[in-house]
Image: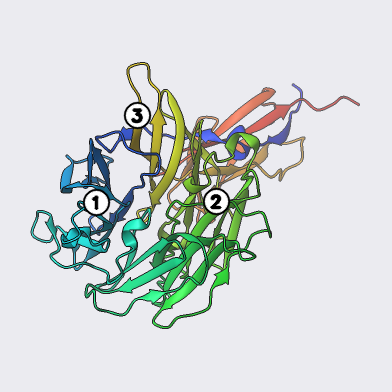
């Protein structure tokens, strides 16, 4: 019987985009809305994800609320408020254990109506039902002109930010009389958001600016003291504008507030996640290029990991980093819903390890389309490192495989190879014996772990060349 040689063969699962185990898209919003609609989500310690979005009900607008359970089940929609003439995209936070919604808009055209002052407002669910505040959240009356009102929480203190022509405003606390920071000096800044640095306790502001000779993505410390704007890494002249709310994700281990953006101009061939101090990019092939720059988001995951996600007309894409935030894991793709035309803005949350992704999607189905917020869930994707040959070819040899999550070992993970299932060691390795004389062909190794999408890698066994 001829001896066989073993040669590593990188599986397509390691190098290419692979399908996730995600289920069908779930429609979140009840009424067809605008392509500028954005969703906001926050998770409570019990694992429940709390979601708010604009409801376009005919001639009036309001904000609706739903939850997504740990198993992905959507609750029945609740009306936060309704009947306003115009509402900007809201944000939601948990303050003292209760969901609180923040928004700006106009209830009607009556200038004597406080809710038509143009200021930002809040609604709390502390009593189990939604109660709109009797006093405004901001002093300024221009938040209504912003496409979104964005927030973060420092303990029991909410922070809010908005943009409007030559205005980048920041408000702190529930008292509208608190002096507000007006940070713009020229037109125009957009897409502002806030996040608290878990390591330093500082409140960070992120935004996009197209100010002449100053275009780019910026981060600025706004609390406890005001710092100077810091331009985030990107090639000069290659940034792609956005008016969708930028991510402001607080990294739980290692600190930093991270945002996501894409360049180069005029086509986004690279998505980047950055805190200023740490930056990690992902170069994209043509099939993965985002259609809308505002669909790029980032979200913090446990142990210092970060998610990045984006969309194009073919579907949604996501990848998760290693713990050190130095490497991205495999890119996954979920196909767009049937008859999807465009996937617009995105938002995401990843604090439980998986990624809950929301996209505002326009469909053109034969039975009637529309633009609706939809939800999808990604699990992190495993990888198997191909074998390292460690025995001569004239005897039985070992096949050493490694199971990783973006390069980090996966405790409790298992690899199945040639009918044998092994639990990997602390470094992620499992070693299998391949007898001499094994039939030539391609053998597949499969890696699994709870809470992950499985991975495969291949080993090609060939007969040695004759001399």
Numbered badge on residue 209? none
Residue drawn at (41%, 61%) of the image: 164
First along the sequence among labels 1 and 2: 1
Residue occupying the point 24% across, 35% down: 30
- Residue 318 image position (x, y, % from top left): 49, 44
- Above or below residue 241? Residue 215 is below
Q: CA distance from mark 1 to mark 2?
A: 26 Å
* SS for callout 2: loop
Q: Position of residue 238 (x, y in %)?
A: 66, 54
Does the image show residue 435? no
User: Could you say whether the residue bearing mark 1 is in a helix, strand or loop?
Assistant: loop
Please tell me which residue is depicted at 69% across the width and 60% down the height of the picture. 236
How crowded pointer 1 is (Cα within 10 Å; few <14, some 14-19, many 20+) is rated as some
Q: Earlier in the sequence, mark 2 or mark 3?
A: 3
Image quadrant where one finds the C terminus: top right
Nearer to us: label 2 or label 3: 3
Point out the tag, 1 or 3, that comes first from the N-terminus.
1
Tell me residue 240's x, y (percent): 59, 51
Q: Which residue is mark 1?
A: 48
Query: Which residue has dot 2 on it?
Result: 406
Compared with 5, 210 (above or below) is below
Q: Which mark is residue 370?
A: 3
Work out how far the residue at label 1 is from the one at label 3, CA to CA, in angstroms. 28 Å
Q: Nearer the viewer, mark 1 or mark 2?
A: 1
């Amino acid at each position: 019987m001829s001896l066989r040689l073993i040669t590593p063969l990188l599986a397509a699962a390691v190098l290419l985009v692979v399908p996730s185990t995600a289920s069908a898209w779930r429609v979140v919003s009840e009424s067809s809305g605008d392509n500028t609609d954005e969703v906001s989500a926050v998770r409570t310690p019990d694992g429940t994800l709390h979601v708010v979005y604009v409801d376009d009900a005919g001639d009036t607008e309001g904000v609706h609320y739903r939850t997504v359970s740990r198993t992905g089940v959507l609750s029945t929609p609740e009306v936060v408020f309704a009947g306003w003439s115009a509402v900007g995209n809201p944000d939601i936070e948990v303050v003292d254990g209760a969901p609180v919604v923040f928004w700006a808009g106009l209830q009607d055209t009556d200038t004597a109506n406080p809710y038509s002052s143009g200021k930002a407002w809040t609604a709390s669910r502390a009593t189990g039902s939604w109660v709109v505040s009797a006093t405004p959240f901001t002093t300024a009356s221009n938040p209504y002109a912003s496409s979104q009102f964005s927030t973060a929480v420092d303990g029991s203190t909410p922070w809010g930010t908005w943009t409007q022509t030559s205005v980048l405003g920041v408000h702190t606390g529930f008292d509208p009389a608190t002096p507000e920071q007006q940070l713009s000096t020229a037109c125009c800044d957009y897409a502002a958001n806030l996040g608290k640095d878990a390591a330093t306790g500082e409140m960070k502001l992120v935004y996009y600016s197209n100010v002449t000779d100053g275009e780019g993505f910026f981060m600025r410390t706004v609390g406890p003291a005001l710092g100077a704007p810091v331009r985030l890494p990107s090639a000069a002249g290659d940034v792609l504008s956005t008016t969708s709310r930028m991510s402001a994700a607080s990294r739980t281990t290692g600190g930093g507030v991270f945002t996501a953006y894409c360049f180069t101009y005029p086509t986004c061939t690279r998505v980047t996640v950055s805190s200023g101090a740490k930056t990690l990019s992902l170069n994209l092939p043509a099939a993965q290029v985002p259609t809308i720059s505002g669909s790029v988001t980032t979200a913090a995951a446990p142990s210092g990991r970060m998610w990045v996600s984006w969309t194009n007309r073919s579907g949604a894409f996501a990848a998760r980093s290693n713990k050190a935030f130095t490497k991205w894991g495999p890119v996954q793709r979920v196909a767009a819903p049937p008859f999807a035309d465009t996937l617009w803005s995105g938002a995401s949350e990843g604090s439980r390890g998986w990624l809950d992704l929301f996209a505002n999607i326009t469909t053109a189905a034969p039975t009637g389309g529309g633009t609706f917020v939809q939800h999808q869930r990604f699990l992190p994707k495993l990888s198997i490192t191909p074998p390292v040959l460690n025995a001569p070819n004239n005897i039985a040899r070992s096949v050493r495989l490694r199971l990783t999550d973006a390069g980090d070992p996966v405790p409790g993970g298992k690899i199945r190879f040639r009918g044998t299932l092994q639990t990997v060691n602390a470094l992620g390795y499992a070693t299998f014996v391949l007898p001499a004389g094994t039939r030539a062909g391609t053998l597949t190794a499969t890696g699994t772990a709870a809470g992950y999408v499985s991975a495969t890698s291949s080993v090609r066994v060939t007969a040695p060349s004759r001399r």
